[in-house]
Amino acid sequence: MSLFTPRRVGHMSPGGSAITYLLLIVWAAFVIFPIYWLVITSFKSVNDVNSGPVFLPFIDFQPSLHAWRDLLIEDWADTSRSYINSIIIALASTALSVLIGSMAAYALARVTYAPRLSTVLAFVLCMAAVLVATMAYGVDWRLAGAVAVALFVLMVRGLGNRIAGRLGNGDILFWMISQRILAPVVVVVPIYMMFQSVGLLDTHIAIILTYAVINLPIVVWLMYDFFASIPRDLEESAQLDGATMFTVFREVVLPLSKPGLAATTLLVMILAWNEYLLALFLSTADAQTMPILVAAMNAGERGILWWTMSAVIVVMILPVLALAVVLQRFISKGILVGAVKG
Amino acid sequence: MRHFKTPLAAGLLATSMLAAPFAQADGHYNGVTVEILTRPGPVIAGRLAERGEEFREMTGANIVVNEVPFAEIFQKLLTDWATGTNSIDVGVFASGWGVELVNGGLVENLDPYIAADDQIDIDDIAPYFREFNQKIGGSTYLITVDGDFQMLYYRRDVLEAAGLEPPRTWEDYLEVAAAVHGQDMNGDGEADYGSCIFKKRNAQSYFAIGSVAASFNQTQGTGEGFWFDQETMEPRINNAGWAEAFRLYKATGEYGPPDELNHDIGDTRALVTSGRCALAIDWGDIGPLSIDEGGEAIRDKMGAIIMPGSRRVVDPASGELTDCNDSLCPHAVDGINYAPFAAFGGWAGAINASSDDQVKQAAYDFLSYMNQAAQSNIDVTIGWTGYNPYRNSQLDDTSNWVQAGFSEDFAQNYLGAIKESLNHPNMASDIRIPGAQQYTGVVLDRELARFLADEITAEQALANIEEAWEEITEDFGRDEQAQMYRLGLGITN
Amino acid sequence: MAADLSPSPTGAAQASASLPARSRGERLNEWLDRNARHIFLWPAVVLILVFSIFPLVASLVIAFSRIRLSGGGFQVRFVGWRNFDKQLFGSEQFHFLGTFGPLSLMGWVFGLAVTAGVIWWIAAYLRAGPTFIGTLGRLFPWGLVLGLGWLLSYTALSGRPFGTLLTTYFYVLVGCAIQFVIGMGLAYLCSRAIRGRNFFRVLFFLPLMITPIGIGYTFRMLADTSKGPFSPLWQAAGLGDFSWATDPWAARMFIIIADSWQWIPFVFIMLLAAFENVPRDYSEAASMDGASEWQIFREITWPQIMPVAATVMLIRVIEAFKIVDLPNIMTSGGPGIATESMSLHALFAWRSLDLGQSSAVAYLLLFVTVVTCVSFFNLVVLRRVRS
């Protein structure tokens, strides 16, 4: 079956198809115009931007390469460093979070977990105690940690008999997604201090790990739904043939989840590619990423260097666009899943 | 590093290299790296990097300029120094922010360095910057690289055609703006604006309101200060002078562009340099910008003058606005009290107290190199550097300015206005106490924005500010704040 | 693992090196297989624990204190509920909640209507057979709806400005509704047999690729009424003297437009994948039986994509509560405080080093987000899925 042959179902009447195309084209125009404006702004001279709208290169205004020259020649060292940093960080953090996240999602979709409520409570209490002791009373963190571990063991044994409740997979899932709720502005300082204490500030590792973790919940949630929608019979027959959980996951489940994986990967990569606040704080120079370069084009009281900023944004879109074109073919293969599911 | 290389700048650079004080490359700082943190260039950072390269060739010290977006500089620097990360040796930032850092013991005291430095010629620095801006509690902690205070700019051609004098008070300002509003001032056939003053929230509107309010509230000289009572730290804001300033500031919007409420200084400058504004307030940058590429529309058409003042000031006894008299306004001229506001205070360098001694010495030598007349007198004439004058020698001699592209006439006018403001005995200081950002950047700025958006009246806004400022003062400790405030004002000359 | 291997690491290495390679691999596999359920889940849990729980608890501590960064680290002073008190009842009340005053007629009508609605909701639940946990859990959404309803009555409906809480809800509710409807519509259209599907789907995805701060600046350019692309239209319509930037509702709508432009692609791409995962057989059969397109969608397609749609919207709602870059760059929260979201409120406090207030606002945001999302999840999604 060819991927691109039109299917019979949903075959439309001429009128219906005209309306469909009209709607799609209207939306396409709405999507394209701001991007078109960005592209032409990157070719405008300072006066063309400041003195009023001009729309068509060569007709309205004479395109100028000054912004591109600034970005790609004069400041090539800055631009290339940020660009390479962004690529390394986006790729590595995405790989990490998709791998770990989809494994966790699969486990949550197939295995029943039941952690004791008492253990979780004890853990949270001990954690809070350590932080209050170290932050507010200046207790050495090693000492506080050791005391907390001992306390934790005692509490688990003591509380375990009194509180009988257990948590389920749903609770774990919700706990994971809830980690994305807190606004990044309040976690910036603690995360900064964490990396500072291990001397990893302004390194790729710090940003990669942080991005992998903040995007993990999204991977888990999206992939959980996709795994849950895959019929179990294929896995079960594979298991009957003696396949392990790893084999089933790699050979049976992942191939079936390609559309979901493709969409999730793309999304997570974009979030990592575009993040600003955490990158700003975790990097000084060596690990600086592209979004910071965009913000840097706001020269404050000198106004915004619209032309160069537009060029930076355009340059930032290109690799993601290429990736989207590649991955969208995988998304198309979702049709095959439908065929299997029947 | 990002900068605009123009043939002119390159030429000036070459001449200044020849004049450099320690021209022989002795390499006594070989292997030393000084990490500087400042805003993104070309403004401020661009010239630091270029001069850093010269400095490296002379001394061997490697000067690295790191750039973060303006709004994040202070947070970033404070976090770096306070948590002991110490990846930054020198912060170049608004001098007003220094208090908080000095208070935390994070900044190196520069007095011994200056005493041992025979190149800096400290007495040439204008009194306000030397005695107030660079000092905190009587010791010098900062080295100025840029002198900032606001002035009024006007279009000489437009005002002359209308037979108007440049405004001396804010009432005049409104009259002039009203008279020329709607004229076409740049010949493009569109109606232009009588007044352009940035009013965007969380941008620079706080500096503009300071410039308007100062002359109503400060009469006794720089040492008086117009933000708080020196003894009790009670805010001097909920009074008739501030209310009048709020109303005047809002009223200028009548003669401005329709979306002025969303204009920051960048938007306003774009309008000024494209010739669309008859009156504008700005820092010293408009002069050099008018001779830069893009400033053709206003070249040799601008005039500059000291910030408008007021005939009526707040009488401390009654709290009401009262006409100036000799005892009330000792510094008044023709019955008008002027108080040019040192908004922002200018960019200045501070050295991390925890850096290595050799790095600190190299960092100081570099800042001193930036500050010395041989370098800075060239740099302040170049628009894109973002550096404005702060030395008397920069103002006395017009030749550097004419060489940079000013006409003799405009150079005289522009430098005259700067000189009048810089040496004014009643120059008004910015808030220079811990938490300054909370007092102004958050509370004052927000209440002002609400007033401009018609959410509340001026009186409500001022009452809210008073209440919130008292809370902040309580949080930081009233006595400590009062002491810091007095230290900031205590040294008069 | 320790049980399988000899105690010392070097001993272990020697022992395993001396074994035939095949057997060593088998043993590892065996071990992996036995512990698979842990190995799959634990990396994620540990990472989240380390990176999220510590900042979460640390900022909770900060929310109850005044913290000052200075030489040698921090000075932390506990101030109890003071930070929250300031936001909810003190000098920041107008900022967070809104400005209070006498109720207008419309305020009364709306407030009473909301109250009646909540009472009806409670009664309906009590009739259906309540459980203790169920009632306890529902107290939160009941309280939240009542509180927000009366807050709206007291502020906007009585002609007074409201604070960052309601502004945030405006972005979340209106923005997400728009994004869901348009995103699903586009996904549906693109899942049909049309020419150029691949082109459209990549094109529609484009806005999501742009960094949010870039979008903020782009829309600021587009919306400039004197030199933006629409300024000629704007002038021609006689609006030359009016600016969206001075009108609270126009400014808020403008931010929603930019937000939608950015996030509709997210809804679109996820739902497109969901639509394409729906088996064709049922709808083909129904189509042959003469069912209309709408019937097919409602009866067959919708139930299938419902779980994914719910997750997508849950994620979208969570992200929408945190909206910060767009209002920050496009309006800086102005005019007044009209476009300031809670996240931006926290950011402003944070920038001025008021970490305590900043954390307090962020925790209030966390609270309303959790209550809203849990309610949405339990009361809407689960119920629909069950039925």
Image (cartoon, coloured by chain):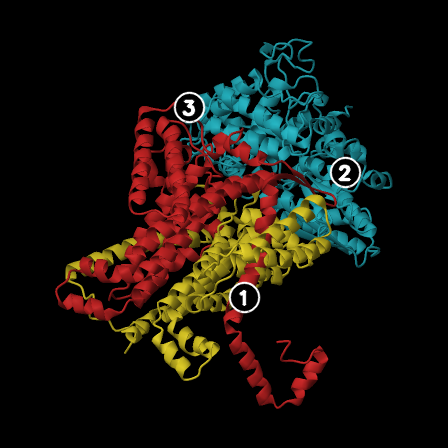
Chain colours: A yellow, B cyan, C red
Q: CA distance from mark 1 to mark 2?
A: 52 Å
Foreground label between 2 and 3: 3
Whether residue C215 sits left or right of residue C300 in the image: it is right
Chain letter of the residue beneath label 3 in the structure image: C
**In front: C147, or B34?**
C147
The residue under label 3 is C101
**Mark 1, mark 2: which one is toward the viewer?**
1
- For label 1, the residue is C42
The reply to whether label 1 and label 3 mark residues of one chain is: yes
Left or right position of C182 against C163: left
Position above or below: C167 against C186: above
Kindly report the distance in space between the C-alpha atoms of the residues bearing marks 2 and 3.
Answer: 49 Å
Amino acid at pointer 3 = Gly
Residue B320: image location, x then y, percent: 58, 11
Q: Residue at x 37, y 52 (%)?
A: C378
Write down the quadrant of residue B129 in the picture: top right
Say what amino acid the circle numbered 2 marks.
Answer: Tyr
* Residue C74 percent across, percent down from the top left: 69, 44
User: Which secondary structure, mark 1?
Assistant: helix
Q: How far is the residue under mark 1 from the one under mark 3?
A: 53 Å
The label nearer to you, 1 versus 3, is 1
Q: Which residue is mark 2?
A: B141
Q: Chain of mark 1?
A: C
